Image (cartoon, rainbow, N blue to C red):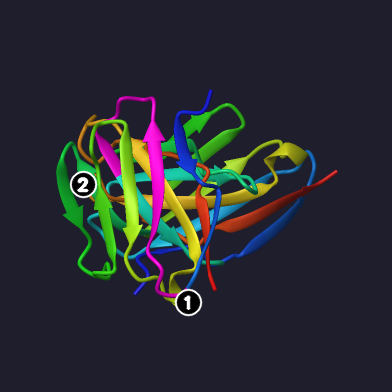
Amino acid sequence: DQQVKQNSPSLSVQEGRISILNCDYTNSMFDYFLWYKKYPAEGPTFLISISSIKDKNEDGRFTVFLNKSAKHLSLHIVPSQPGDSAVYFCAASSGTYKYIFGTGTRLKVLA
Amino acid sequence: DAMVIQNPRYQVTQFGKPVTLSCSQTLNHNVMYWYQQKSSQAPKLLFHYYDKDFNNEADTPDNFQSRRPNTSFCFLDIRSPGLGDAAMYLCATSINADRGQNIQYFGAGTRLSVL
């Protein structure tokens, strides 16, 4: 039973437009969420986080939104750039050192 | 300047032949993790060390063992690799920050093939 789900395996977006990556979770005890970006042949790198006490966190072109009632979070990238093409993972934690990861969404930004 | 280093990047072993994957870190983080990731699947936590305390996940097979001789190094031992153990193995570290709000830093992974 997957507690963190990324239902879109892939997404293509035109350069300059908004990319929206979605993540759903089932465990209401999750209270901290991370997004990671992964390029081929590299490990995942941390992108942005959000605590359950917030509903939005912004860092430059990246914004994460959290809807606790819907158990849904999304990552917005505006404007999208070709260098953003990567696999994006969301991960969730419930007050421990352990994270549950989603299966990832492959983003392709078209020039 | 790599912070979490995994060696080797690619490892080929034979069915049933023990193999060891290594991870080192220059971050001085006290928590180290090992994940298994198969194609198109989520990284799955195998175990983690909090300092010297070993924490095994309930569903991690006994075939998988780990050692952490010091803060900087952590090893993953697969005692008798099966074909189903072919995967990417990711090492990660985190510092003991606010519980549950720690960021994990990953190495580039070791891709294991079992022949």
In the image, residue B17 lies at what x, y percent? 41, 68
Quarter of the figure with residue B35: bottom left
Seen at 22% across and 32% down, the residue is B98
The residue that mark 1 highlights is B83
Relative to B12, A25 lies left or right: left
Seen at 27% across and 70% down, the residue is B61
- Give the residue type that dot 1 points to: Leu
Asked if badges 2 and 1 are on one and the same chain, I answer no
Give the total number of marks visible in the rendering: 2
Q: What element carries label 1?
A: helix
Seen at 27% across and 67% down, the residue is B60
Q: Which span is picked out in magenta?
A: B15-32
Q: Is mark 2 on a helix, strand or loop?
A: loop
Q: Which residue lies furthest to the right in this view?
A: A111
In the image, residue B65 lies at what x, y percent? 26, 59
- Give the residue type that dot 2 points to: Thr
In the image, residue B14 lies at what x, y percent? 49, 70
Relative to B48, B84 lies left or right: right
Please, which chain is the residue tagged with disc 2 on? A
Q: Distance between the residues labelled 2 and 1?
A: 32 Å
The residue that mark 2 highlights is A96
In the image, residue B24 lies at what x, y percent? 39, 35
Q: B115 and A108: which one is in front?
A: B115
Q: B32 and A26: which one is in front?
A: B32
Relative to B28, B86 lies left or right: right
